[in-house]
């Protein structure tokens, strides 16, 4: 039964080592299918998948670091299924010690070969920081705002209106998170050897399209998957 499940899983991901198809290619294709309303049929029923994962453990193909915004569902956005991603979600996709530890755990304890940092349009955390509403810095919210503030400050030097400021700050916040992840001493050897790549991206709330920031990729796109 597990062999049948595994075969269906591999066919779904359409991964072919011989033609250098990468996980990033698969994610891009999945998002293109999502925005074209071409949704795959599950290779096995949901309950069968749950049972298989319960028995044989998880085998995620990618780490997704993204926002807690309810409008974002990584599995749907990339036309994937439960179990395909190791997901870390926080408001503004900010990463601290606990999130970094979760990312390091995923890389060192599974077969993931890519980390996607995905921001999105109209990010509430960044917007709140820009608008400086009274009360937004109460409790632990202030820690989130403190983390996104550097991106806003940098964006403010490059733009001259609030609309452009928000859009640019959202992009710069992705780069900020990518750089924090790259600073991990645990991940360094994985990155340098090409076993893992980190890619920034931004999700379009209105369109469903994911734009990947190719200049964040830590090694060439056509990397060889190393086991």
Image (cartoon, helix red, strand yellow):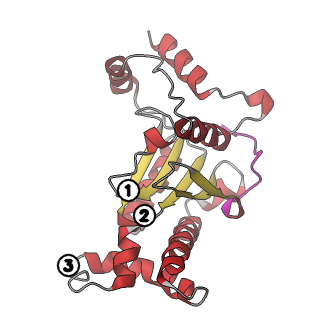
Label 2 vs 3, first from the N-terminus: 2
Q: Name which residue lies at 54% across and 41% down.
A: 35
Say if the magenta span includes residue 225. yes
Task: Tell me the quarter of the image containing the N terminus.
Answer: top left
Q: Which residues are magenta?
A: 216-227
Total number of numbered labels? Answer: 3
Mark on residue 93? 2
- Label 3: which residue? 139
Q: Quadrant of residue 50?
A: top left
Residues at marks 1 and 2 touching, judged by CB atoms closer than 8 Å? yes
Task: Tell me the quarter of the image containing the C terminus.
Answer: top right
Q: Name the side, left or right, on which 46 lies relative to 186.
A: left
Label 1 vs 3, first from the N-terminus: 1
| Disc 2 from disc 3: Cα separation | 18 Å
Q: Counting other residues with Cα less than 10 Å from the Cα at mark 2, is it few (<14), some (14-19), or many (20 or more)?
A: many
Q: Name which residue lies at 51% across and 57% down.
A: 118
- Location of residue 83 in the rendering, given as x and y in whole percent from the top left corner: 42, 34
- Label 1: which residue? 89
């Amino acid at each position: 039964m597990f062999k049948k499940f595994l075969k269906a899983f591999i066919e779904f991901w359409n991964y072919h080592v011989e033609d250098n198809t990468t996980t990033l290619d698969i994610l891009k294709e999945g998002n293109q299918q999502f925005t074209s309303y071409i949704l795959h049929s599950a290779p096995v029923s949901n309950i069968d998948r749950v049972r298989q994962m319960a028995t044989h453990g998880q085998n995620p193909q990618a780490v997704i670091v993204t926002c807690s915004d309810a409008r974002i569902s990584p599995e749907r956005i990339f036309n994937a299924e439960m179990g395909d991603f190791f997901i870390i979600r926080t408001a503004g996709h900010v990463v601290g010690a606990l999130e970094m530890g979760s990312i390091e755990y995923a890389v060192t304890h599974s077969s993931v070969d890519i980390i996607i940092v995905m921001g999105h349009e109209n990010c509430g955390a960044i917007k709140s920081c820009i608008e400086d509403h009274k009360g937004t810095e109460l409790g632990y919210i202030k820690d989130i705002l403190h983390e996104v503030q550097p991106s806003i400050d940098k964006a403010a030097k490059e733009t001259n209106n609030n609309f452009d400021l928000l859009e640019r700050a959202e992009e710069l916040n992705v780069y900020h998170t990518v750089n924090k992840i790259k600073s991990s001493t645990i991940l360094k050897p994985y990155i340098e050897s090409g076993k893992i790549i980190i890619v920034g991206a931004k999700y379009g709330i209105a369109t469903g399209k994911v734009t990947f920031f190719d200049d964040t990729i830590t090694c060439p796109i056509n990397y060889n998957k190393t086991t």
